[in-house]
Image (cartoon, helix red, strand yellow):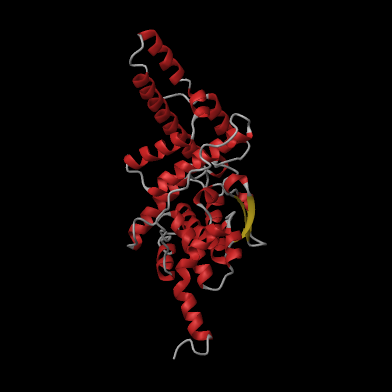
Amino acid sequence: MLEHPNIVREFLEYLSYERHFSGHTAKCYNADLQQYTQWLAQNTQENASSSDAGFDQSHHNAATAVAVDMSTQIIRADVNIIRAFMAYLHEQQYSKATSARKLATLRSFYKFLVRRGHIETSPVAAIRTPKQEKTLPRFLSLEQINVLLNCPDTTDMLGARDRAILETLYSSGLRVSELVALNLGDVDFLGEVLHVRGKGKKERLTPVGAGALQAIQRYLTYRDADPRKARFDQQALFVNKHGQRLSTRSVRRKLDKYLTQAGLDPRISPHTLRHTFATHMLNNGADLRVVQELLGHQSLSTTQVYTHLTTSRMKEVYEESHPRGSI
Protein backbone atom coordinates (compact mmCIF):
# COMPACT_ATOMS: atom_id res chain seq x y z
CA MET A 1 0.00 0.00 0.00
CA LEU A 2 1.36 3.42 -0.97
CA GLU A 3 2.11 5.94 1.72
CA HIS A 4 0.10 9.11 1.27
CA PRO A 5 2.04 11.89 -0.48
CA ASN A 6 2.48 15.15 1.42
CA ILE A 7 -0.35 17.03 -0.26
CA VAL A 8 -2.82 14.25 0.61
CA ARG A 9 -1.68 14.21 4.25
CA GLU A 10 -2.04 18.00 4.27
CA PHE A 11 -5.64 17.66 3.11
CA LEU A 12 -6.50 14.94 5.64
CA GLU A 13 -5.04 17.02 8.47
CA TYR A 14 -7.12 19.96 7.26
CA LEU A 15 -10.28 17.82 7.47
CA SER A 16 -9.48 16.65 11.00
CA TYR A 17 -8.05 19.77 12.62
CA GLU A 18 -9.67 22.66 10.75
CA ARG A 19 -12.96 21.24 9.50
CA HIS A 20 -13.34 18.93 12.52
CA PHE A 21 -14.71 16.04 10.47
CA SER A 22 -15.66 12.94 12.45
CA GLY A 23 -13.25 10.01 12.57
CA HIS A 24 -15.60 7.95 10.39
CA THR A 25 -15.88 10.65 7.69
CA ALA A 26 -12.12 11.27 7.68
CA LYS A 27 -11.58 7.51 7.34
CA CYS A 28 -13.80 7.43 4.23
CA TYR A 29 -11.89 10.32 2.64
CA ASN A 30 -8.63 8.55 3.50
CA ALA A 31 -9.75 5.31 1.84
CA ASP A 32 -11.03 7.08 -1.29
CA LEU A 33 -7.77 9.01 -1.76
CA GLN A 34 -5.71 5.87 -1.08
CA GLN A 35 -7.54 4.10 -3.89
CA TYR A 36 -7.17 7.08 -6.24
CA THR A 37 -3.43 7.48 -5.65
CA GLN A 38 -2.82 3.74 -6.05
CA TRP A 39 -4.75 3.72 -9.32
CA LEU A 40 -2.93 6.87 -10.46
CA ALA A 41 0.47 5.32 -9.69
CA GLN A 42 -0.36 2.13 -11.57
CA ASN A 43 -1.91 4.02 -14.49
CA THR A 44 1.11 6.34 -14.78
CA GLN A 45 3.62 3.49 -14.57
CA GLU A 46 1.80 1.54 -17.30
CA ASN A 47 1.85 4.60 -19.55
CA ALA A 48 5.54 5.18 -18.82
CA SER A 49 6.36 1.54 -19.59
CA SER A 50 4.58 1.60 -22.97
CA SER A 51 6.02 4.98 -24.03
CA ASP A 52 9.59 3.99 -23.01
CA ALA A 53 9.54 0.63 -24.79
CA GLY A 54 12.18 1.80 -27.27
CA PHE A 55 14.56 3.29 -24.67
CA ASP A 56 17.33 1.62 -22.65
CA GLN A 57 16.85 0.46 -19.07
CA SER A 58 18.30 3.61 -17.49
CA HIS A 59 15.71 5.75 -19.25
CA HIS A 60 12.98 3.36 -18.15
CA ASN A 61 14.11 3.46 -14.51
CA ALA A 62 14.14 7.26 -14.60
CA ALA A 63 10.61 7.30 -16.00
CA THR A 64 9.43 4.90 -13.28
CA ALA A 65 11.02 7.05 -10.58
CA VAL A 66 9.12 10.06 -11.88
CA ALA A 67 5.94 7.98 -12.02
CA VAL A 68 6.02 7.21 -8.31
CA ASP A 69 6.36 10.88 -7.36
CA MET A 70 2.69 10.95 -6.51
CA SER A 71 2.47 14.59 -5.48
CA THR A 72 3.61 15.55 -8.97
CA GLN A 73 1.22 13.12 -10.63
CA ILE A 74 -1.70 14.36 -8.53
CA ILE A 75 -0.95 17.98 -9.41
CA ARG A 76 -0.55 17.15 -13.12
CA ALA A 77 -3.83 15.20 -13.32
CA ASP A 78 -6.26 16.68 -15.84
CA VAL A 79 -9.93 16.11 -16.61
CA ASN A 80 -9.08 13.06 -18.75
CA ILE A 81 -7.34 11.40 -15.81
CA ILE A 82 -10.39 11.94 -13.61
CA ARG A 83 -12.67 10.55 -16.34
CA ALA A 84 -10.40 7.53 -16.69
CA PHE A 85 -10.60 6.93 -12.93
CA MET A 86 -14.40 7.14 -13.03
CA ALA A 87 -14.40 4.67 -15.94
CA TYR A 88 -12.23 2.35 -13.84
CA LEU A 89 -14.76 2.53 -10.98
CA HIS A 90 -17.52 1.65 -13.45
CA GLU A 91 -15.50 -1.33 -14.73
CA GLN A 92 -15.05 -2.49 -11.14
CA GLN A 93 -18.87 -2.41 -10.83
CA TYR A 94 -19.05 0.15 -8.04
CA SER A 95 -22.56 1.45 -7.47
CA LYS A 96 -23.49 4.92 -8.68
CA ALA A 97 -23.78 6.08 -5.07
CA THR A 98 -20.28 4.86 -4.21
CA SER A 99 -18.79 6.36 -7.38
CA ALA A 100 -20.52 9.66 -6.62
CA ARG A 101 -19.05 9.67 -3.11
CA LYS A 102 -15.54 9.00 -4.42
CA LEU A 103 -15.95 11.79 -6.98
CA ALA A 104 -17.11 14.11 -4.19
CA THR A 105 -13.93 13.26 -2.28
CA LEU A 106 -11.81 14.19 -5.30
CA ARG A 107 -13.83 17.34 -5.84
CA SER A 108 -13.16 18.48 -2.25
CA PHE A 109 -9.50 17.45 -2.47
CA TYR A 110 -8.77 19.36 -5.67
CA LYS A 111 -10.70 22.42 -4.45
CA PHE A 112 -8.41 22.34 -1.43
CA LEU A 113 -5.34 22.18 -3.70
CA VAL A 114 -6.61 25.23 -5.62
CA ARG A 115 -7.14 27.18 -2.37
CA ARG A 116 -3.66 26.27 -1.13
CA GLY A 117 -2.07 27.33 -4.43
CA HIS A 118 -0.87 23.89 -5.50
CA ILE A 119 -2.86 24.09 -8.76
CA GLU A 120 -4.67 26.83 -10.66
CA THR A 121 -7.86 24.99 -11.61
CA SER A 122 -9.53 21.78 -10.47
CA PRO A 123 -9.60 18.90 -13.00
CA VAL A 124 -12.84 17.73 -11.35
CA ALA A 125 -14.74 20.97 -12.03
CA ALA A 126 -15.96 19.82 -15.43
CA ILE A 127 -16.98 16.33 -14.26
CA ARG A 128 -20.67 15.81 -13.57
CA THR A 129 -21.75 13.66 -10.65
CA PRO A 130 -23.29 10.37 -11.84
CA LYS A 131 -27.07 10.47 -11.70
CA GLN A 132 -28.19 8.26 -8.84
CA GLU A 133 -31.25 6.16 -8.32
CA LYS A 134 -33.46 7.78 -5.69
CA THR A 135 -34.01 5.51 -2.72
CA LEU A 136 -36.41 6.43 0.03
CA PRO A 137 -35.33 6.02 3.65
CA ARG A 138 -36.78 3.03 5.48
CA PHE A 139 -38.87 3.91 8.54
CA LEU A 140 -41.03 2.21 11.16
CA SER A 141 -44.73 2.59 11.75
CA LEU A 142 -45.92 3.89 15.13
CA GLU A 143 -47.03 0.37 16.06
CA GLN A 144 -43.61 -1.06 15.18
CA ILE A 145 -41.70 1.62 17.10
CA ASN A 146 -43.85 0.99 20.18
CA VAL A 147 -43.12 -2.75 20.02
CA LEU A 148 -39.39 -2.05 19.72
CA LEU A 149 -39.30 0.46 22.59
CA ASN A 150 -40.99 -2.04 24.91
CA CYS A 151 -38.46 -4.82 24.26
CA PRO A 152 -35.70 -4.00 26.81
CA ASP A 153 -36.10 -5.41 30.31
CA THR A 154 -35.83 -2.29 32.46
CA THR A 155 -35.36 -4.10 35.79
CA ASP A 156 -31.56 -3.66 35.70
CA MET A 157 -29.09 -0.96 34.66
CA LEU A 158 -28.20 -2.32 31.21
CA GLY A 159 -31.80 -2.96 30.21
CA ALA A 160 -32.84 0.48 31.46
CA ARG A 161 -29.92 1.96 29.52
CA ASP A 162 -31.04 0.22 26.32
CA ARG A 163 -34.60 1.51 26.73
CA ALA A 164 -33.20 5.03 27.25
CA ILE A 165 -31.06 4.70 24.11
CA LEU A 166 -33.98 3.62 21.92
CA GLU A 167 -36.28 6.27 23.38
CA THR A 168 -33.67 9.00 22.83
CA LEU A 169 -32.90 8.01 19.23
CA TYR A 170 -36.59 8.08 18.34
CA SER A 171 -37.48 11.11 20.48
CA SER A 172 -34.77 13.43 19.17
CA GLY A 173 -33.71 11.97 15.82
CA LEU A 174 -30.05 11.86 16.82
CA ARG A 175 -27.32 10.27 14.73
CA VAL A 176 -25.89 7.30 16.64
CA SER A 177 -22.51 9.08 16.78
CA GLU A 178 -24.26 12.03 18.45
CA LEU A 179 -25.98 9.72 20.90
CA VAL A 180 -22.81 8.01 22.14
CA ALA A 181 -21.06 11.40 22.41
CA LEU A 182 -23.64 12.68 24.91
CA ASN A 183 -22.30 13.55 28.34
CA LEU A 184 -24.21 13.55 31.61
CA GLY A 185 -24.23 17.35 31.57
CA ASP A 186 -25.79 17.42 28.09
CA VAL A 187 -29.20 16.38 29.40
CA ASP A 188 -31.29 19.33 30.59
CA PHE A 189 -34.16 17.69 32.47
CA LEU A 190 -35.72 21.03 33.39
CA GLY A 191 -35.56 22.55 29.90
CA GLU A 192 -36.29 19.17 28.24
CA VAL A 193 -33.48 19.57 25.69
CA LEU A 194 -30.23 17.82 24.78
CA HIS A 195 -26.95 19.58 24.02
CA VAL A 196 -25.81 17.78 20.86
CA ARG A 197 -22.44 17.85 19.12
CA GLY A 198 -23.10 17.09 15.47
CA LYS A 199 -21.08 16.80 12.28
CA GLY A 200 -18.11 19.13 12.00
CA LYS A 201 -18.29 19.79 15.76
CA LYS A 202 -21.42 21.89 15.18
CA GLU A 203 -23.47 22.14 18.36
CA ARG A 204 -27.22 22.43 18.69
CA LEU A 205 -29.96 22.14 21.29
CA THR A 206 -32.66 19.64 20.41
CA PRO A 207 -35.90 18.89 22.29
CA VAL A 208 -36.28 15.51 23.95
CA GLY A 209 -39.64 14.02 24.91
CA ALA A 210 -40.92 13.19 28.37
CA GLY A 211 -40.81 9.45 27.63
CA ALA A 212 -37.12 9.59 26.77
CA LEU A 213 -36.31 11.76 29.80
CA GLN A 214 -38.12 9.32 32.10
CA ALA A 215 -36.17 6.43 30.55
CA ILE A 216 -32.86 8.28 31.01
CA GLN A 217 -33.73 9.09 34.63
CA ARG A 218 -34.59 5.44 35.33
CA TYR A 219 -31.25 4.35 33.85
CA LEU A 220 -29.34 6.96 35.89
CA THR A 221 -31.05 5.78 39.08
CA TYR A 222 -29.70 2.27 38.49
CA ARG A 223 -26.30 3.68 37.53
CA ASP A 224 -26.04 5.80 40.69
CA ALA A 225 -26.83 2.74 42.81
CA ASP A 226 -24.17 0.57 41.14
CA PRO A 227 -21.31 -0.21 43.58
CA ARG A 228 -18.81 0.23 40.72
CA LYS A 229 -20.04 3.77 40.02
CA ALA A 230 -16.76 5.43 41.05
CA ARG A 231 -14.91 3.50 38.32
CA PHE A 232 -17.38 4.49 35.59
CA ASP A 233 -16.60 7.15 32.99
CA GLN A 234 -17.70 10.26 34.89
CA GLN A 235 -18.57 12.20 31.73
CA ALA A 236 -20.28 9.75 29.39
CA LEU A 237 -24.06 9.44 29.57
CA PHE A 238 -24.31 5.94 28.11
CA VAL A 239 -21.73 3.44 29.33
CA ASN A 240 -21.12 -0.26 28.70
CA LYS A 241 -21.04 -3.01 31.34
CA HIS A 242 -17.46 -2.02 32.20
CA GLY A 243 -18.45 1.60 32.78
CA GLN A 244 -16.76 2.94 29.64
CA ARG A 245 -18.42 5.13 27.00
CA LEU A 246 -20.62 3.07 24.71
CA SER A 247 -19.49 2.73 21.07
CA THR A 248 -21.63 3.09 17.94
CA ARG A 249 -20.98 -0.56 17.16
CA SER A 250 -22.35 -1.58 20.55
CA VAL A 251 -25.53 0.40 19.93
CA ARG A 252 -25.96 -1.45 16.63
CA ARG A 253 -25.51 -4.82 18.34
CA LYS A 254 -28.06 -3.93 21.02
CA LEU A 255 -30.56 -2.82 18.38
CA ASP A 256 -30.07 -6.09 16.46
CA LYS A 257 -30.91 -8.00 19.64
CA TYR A 258 -34.19 -6.14 20.14
CA LEU A 259 -35.14 -6.33 16.45
CA THR A 260 -34.95 -10.13 16.75
CA GLN A 261 -37.08 -10.04 19.89
CA ALA A 262 -39.66 -7.79 18.23
CA GLY A 263 -39.72 -9.81 14.99
CA LEU A 264 -38.81 -6.71 12.94
CA ASP A 265 -36.73 -6.39 9.78
CA PRO A 266 -33.07 -7.11 10.70
CA ARG A 267 -31.93 -4.52 8.13
CA ILE A 268 -33.23 -1.76 10.42
CA SER A 269 -30.33 0.33 11.75
CA PRO A 270 -30.01 3.07 14.39
CA HIS A 271 -30.28 5.53 11.49
CA THR A 272 -33.70 4.05 10.69
CA LEU A 273 -34.91 5.48 14.01
CA ARG A 274 -33.69 8.90 12.83
CA HIS A 275 -35.64 8.43 9.59
CA THR A 276 -38.67 7.36 11.62
CA PHE A 277 -38.43 10.46 13.81
CA ALA A 278 -38.37 12.77 10.75
CA THR A 279 -41.17 10.96 8.94
CA HIS A 280 -43.48 10.91 11.96
CA MET A 281 -42.81 14.61 12.63
CA LEU A 282 -43.73 15.58 9.06
CA ASN A 283 -46.73 13.26 8.98
CA ASN A 284 -48.07 15.07 12.03
CA GLY A 285 -47.75 18.53 10.54
CA ALA A 286 -44.22 19.68 11.48
CA ASP A 287 -42.69 22.36 9.25
CA LEU A 288 -39.91 21.09 6.98
CA ARG A 289 -37.46 23.76 8.15
CA VAL A 290 -38.11 22.90 11.78
CA VAL A 291 -37.32 19.25 11.04
CA GLN A 292 -34.18 20.40 9.23
CA GLU A 293 -33.04 22.21 12.37
CA LEU A 294 -33.90 19.26 14.60
CA LEU A 295 -31.92 16.85 12.43
CA GLY A 296 -28.96 19.22 12.20
CA HIS A 297 -29.05 19.22 8.38
CA GLN A 298 -27.02 22.00 6.79
CA SER A 299 -29.09 21.96 3.59
CA LEU A 300 -32.88 21.85 3.30
CA SER A 301 -32.53 19.58 0.26
CA THR A 302 -31.16 16.85 2.54
CA THR A 303 -34.33 16.99 4.63
CA GLN A 304 -36.63 17.10 1.60
CA VAL A 305 -36.10 13.40 0.93
CA TYR A 306 -38.59 12.77 3.75
CA THR A 307 -41.34 14.66 1.95
CA HIS A 308 -41.66 11.72 -0.45
CA LEU A 309 -42.65 9.58 2.51
CA THR A 310 -45.45 11.87 3.59
CA THR A 311 -47.46 11.88 0.35
CA SER A 312 -50.21 9.68 1.77
CA ARG A 313 -50.63 12.02 4.73
CA MET A 314 -50.78 15.03 2.38
CA LYS A 315 -53.53 13.32 0.38
CA GLU A 316 -55.51 12.69 3.56
CA VAL A 317 -55.24 16.35 4.59
CA TYR A 318 -56.21 17.43 1.06
CA GLU A 319 -59.29 15.22 1.01
CA GLU A 320 -60.32 16.40 4.47
CA SER A 321 -59.71 20.11 3.77
CA HIS A 322 -60.63 20.77 0.15
CA PRO A 323 -64.38 21.23 -0.56
CA ARG A 324 -64.17 18.91 -3.52
CA GLY A 325 -61.29 16.78 -2.27
CA SER A 326 -63.46 13.67 -1.94
CA ILE A 327 -66.74 13.38 -3.75
Relative to residue 3, is residue 22 depicted above or below? Answer: below
In the rendered view, tell whether residue 293 sits above or below residue 233: below
Asked which quadrant contains residue 56, the reply is top left
* Residue 241 visible in rendering: no
**Residue 133 appears at what percent x and percent y?**
39, 56
**Where residue 22 sits in the image (x, y, percent)?**
54, 42
**Could you tell whether 132 is left or right of 171 in the image?**
left
Q: Which is more toward the observer, 71 or 196?
A: 71
Quarter occupied by the N terminus: top left
In this view, the residue in front, 209 or 309, is 309
Residue 30 appears left or right of 208: left
Return the residue nearer the eye: 255 or 287: 287
- The picture quadrant where one finds residue 297 is bottom right
Residue shown at the point (48%, 25%) measured from the top left: 73
Q: Nearer the viewer, residue 73 or 224?
A: 73
Tell me residue 99's x, y (percent): 41, 44
Please provide percent x and percent y for residue 304.
52, 62
| Quadrant (top left, top right, bottom left, bottom right) of the C terminus | bottom left
The residue located at (36%, 12%) in the rendering is 55
The answer to whether residue 36 is visible is yes
Q: In the picture provided, is 201 more to the left or to the right than 85?
A: right
Can you name the residue that lies furthest to the right here?
Answer: 191
